């Protein structure tokens, strides 16, 4: 064993990011509960808000997840009437997901999550944006499959 002391958790970036993610989820949960959706469903809605009518695979790629992980929240969103799935006319193996009018309304309502997070953070919009850019740069530098 080496005589080097372990780095305290609070000095480890990975723990800070993990703890921040948990705190964000705790902040979002009551609002998501009131909307009747989960965080994974919220993410799917946001992907469709960026580009509607994409495949399950495209949603999974955007969220850096496996298709099998994305299918259950999409099915629950469909059962709730927020999205609809349609088979591709070109390739019936492909399923495209579309926001319904109710889903679009919910997506607009969910914008309060980001606003609430920024408010509670005590950061200015510029600080909040700078932090997001730094985290995205870190994510990009580490790569999806690293």
Image (cartoon, rainbow, N blue to C red):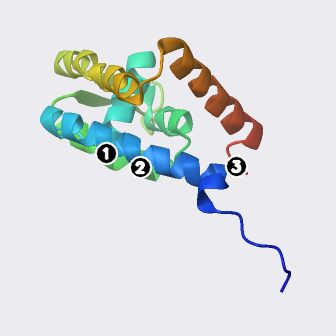
Element on which disc 3 rests:
loop
Residue count near mark 3 (Cα–Cα under 10 Å), binned few <14, some 14–19, many ≥20: few
The reply to whether the C-beta atoms of the residues labelled 2 and 1 are less than 8 Å apart is yes
The reply to whether callout 3 and callout 1 are in contact (CB within 8 Å) is no
**Neighbour tally class for label 1: few under 14, some 14-19, many 20 plus, Cα within 10 Å:** few
* Pointer 2 local density, CA inside 10 Å: few below 14, some 14–19, many at least 20: few
Would you identify the image quadrant in which residue 42 lies? top left
Q: Is residue 36 above or below residue 46?
A: below
**Mark 3 or 1, which is nearer the eye?**
1
**Could you tell me which residue is drawn at 21 percent across and 22 percent down?**
106
| Cα–Cα span, label 3 and label 1 | 27 Å
Find residue 31 and report its horizontal and vertical position in percent: 21, 34
The reply to whether residue 53 is visible in this rendering is: no
Q: Which mark is residue 145?
A: 3
> x and y percent of residue 125 in the render?
48, 13
**Residue drawn at point x = 31 percent, y = 24 percent:** 116
Could you tell me if the residues under marks 3 and 2 are in contact, i.e. CB atoms within 8 Å? no
Asked whether, in this view, residue 3 is left or right of residue 87, the answer is right
Quarter of the rendering containing residue 126: top right
Q: Percent from the top left, x then y, of residue 54?
A: 44, 25
Image point 45% across, 35% down: which residue?
94
Distance between the alpha carbons at the discs numbered 3 and 2: 22 Å
Discs 3/2, front: 2
Q: Earlier in the sequence, mark 3 or mark 2?
A: 2
Quadrant occupied by the N terminus: bottom right
Q: Secondary structure at mark 2?
A: helix
Q: Which mark is residue 26?
A: 1
Q: Earlier in the sequence, mark 3 or mark 1?
A: 1
Task: Identify the mark at residue 22; answer none if there is no mark.
Answer: 2
Say which of 27 and 109 sits in front.
27
């Amino acid at each position: 064993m080496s005589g080097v002391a372990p780095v305290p958790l609070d000095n480890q970036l990975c723990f800070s990011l993990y703890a921040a993610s948990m705190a964000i989820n705790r902040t979002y949960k009551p609002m998501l509960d009131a909307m009747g959706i989960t965080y994974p469903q919220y993410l799917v809605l946001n992907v469709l808000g960026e580009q509607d009518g994409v495949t399950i695979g495209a949603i999974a790629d955007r969220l850096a997840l496996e298709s099998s992980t994305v299918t259950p929240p999409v099915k629950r969103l469909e059962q709730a009437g927020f999205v609809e799935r349609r088979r591709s006319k070109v390739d019936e193996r492909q399923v495209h997901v579309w926001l319904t009018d109710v889903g679009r309304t919910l997506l607009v309502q969910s914008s309060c999550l980001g606003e609430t997070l920024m408010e509670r953070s005590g950061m200015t919009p510029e600080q909040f944006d700078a932090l997001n850019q730094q985290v995205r740069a870190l994510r990009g530098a580490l790569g999806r499959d690293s």
